[in-house]
Image (cartoon, rainbow, N blue to C red):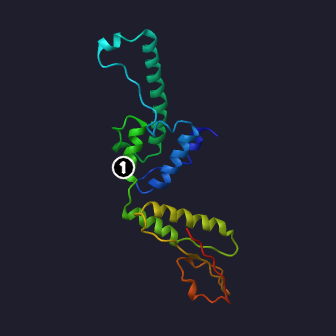
């Protein structure tokens, strides 16, 4: 699968989904072997500032610097383009001043990587909306709860969230799970069963 097709697996960053976007975007760039560029581990080389210092360089050294600059601009430009294409039009316009992939990545992290009331509420809502039925594979629901809770932990101050308890209740005539946060002490063990998951 080409990197162009892989790019469709990365959601468009709209300002509310930074955590999900960053994980997918990093994976895409890593798959091309160029994560060192937005990570800031590859620096652009420069010629000396003055003509006098530049004249002191050998012809071979000048050619080496020029090749390094061209390689950096090519590779970093590709990564910069990949990131830009997965941003909403408004965010693209607001970050036109970023001319390297590292500067763009850091600017997006500073702007959208911090916790806000809307991002925490969205993650909490995703947890509450998780349900399980007896006729379906429970693993997909566990994965959904774990994913939503992991995002919520990332978006809240350290220690603000305890370990959640997810319970499943099976009663006669009702196969729908009770969801997230039920108190297991209120359930009748003769009518159903429960599953507790610590995150």
Q: Residue at x 57, y 83 (%)?
A: 184
Numbered label tally: 1
* x, y percent for residue 145: 56, 67
Q: Which residue is mark 1?
A: 110
* x, y percent for residue 15: 40, 54
Q: Nearer the viewer, residue 181 or 95?
A: 181
Note whether 114 is above or below 189 in the view shown. Answer: above
Q: Residue at x 36, y 19 (%)?
A: 47
* x, y percent for residue 167: 59, 77
* x, y percent for residue 92: 39, 43
Q: Nearer the viewer, residue 37 or 135?
A: 37
| Residue 71 in the figure: left or right of residue 174 | left
Q: Residue at x 47, y 19 (%)?
A: 67
SS of the residue under disc 1: helix
Note whether 44 is above or below 52 in the view shown. Answer: below
Q: Is residue 11 visible?
A: no
The quadrant in which residue 61 appears is top left
Q: Is residue 56 visible?
A: yes
| Residue 79 in the figure: left or right of residue 49 | right
Quadrant where the image shows the C terminus: bottom right
| Crowd class of label 1 (few under 14; some 14 to 19; many from 20; radius 10 Å) | few
Note whether 161 is above or below 4 in the view shown. Answer: below
Q: Nearer the viewer, residue 107 or 153?
A: 153
Quadrant where the image shows the N terminus: top right
| Residue 189 in the figure: left or right of residue 101 | right
């Amino acid at each position: 699968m080409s990197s162009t097709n892989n790019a469709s697996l990365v959601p468009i960053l709209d300002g509310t989904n930074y955590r999900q976007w960053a994980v997918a975007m990093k994976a895409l760039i890593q798959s091309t072997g160029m994560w060192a560029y937005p990570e800031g581990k590859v620096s652009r080389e420069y010629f000396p500032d003055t003509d006098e210092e530049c004249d002191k360089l050998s012809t071979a050294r000048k050619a080496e610097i020029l090749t390094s600059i061209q390689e950096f601009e090519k590779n970093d430009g590709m990564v910069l383009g990949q990131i830009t294409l997965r941003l909403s039009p408004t965010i693209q316009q607001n970050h036109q001043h970023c001319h390297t992939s590292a500067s763009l990545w850091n600017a997006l992290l500073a702007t959208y990587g911090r916790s806000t009331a809307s991002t925490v509420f969205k993650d909490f809502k995703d947890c509450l909306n998780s349900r399980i039925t007896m006729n379906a594979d429970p693993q997909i629901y566990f994965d959904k709860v774990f994913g939503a809770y992991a995002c919520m932990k990332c978006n809240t101050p350290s220690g603000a969230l305890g370990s959640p308890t997810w319970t499943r209740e099976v009663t006669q005539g009702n196969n729908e799970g009770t969801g997230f946060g039920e108190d297991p002490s209120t359930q009748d063990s003769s009518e159903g069963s429960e599953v507790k998951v610590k995150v």
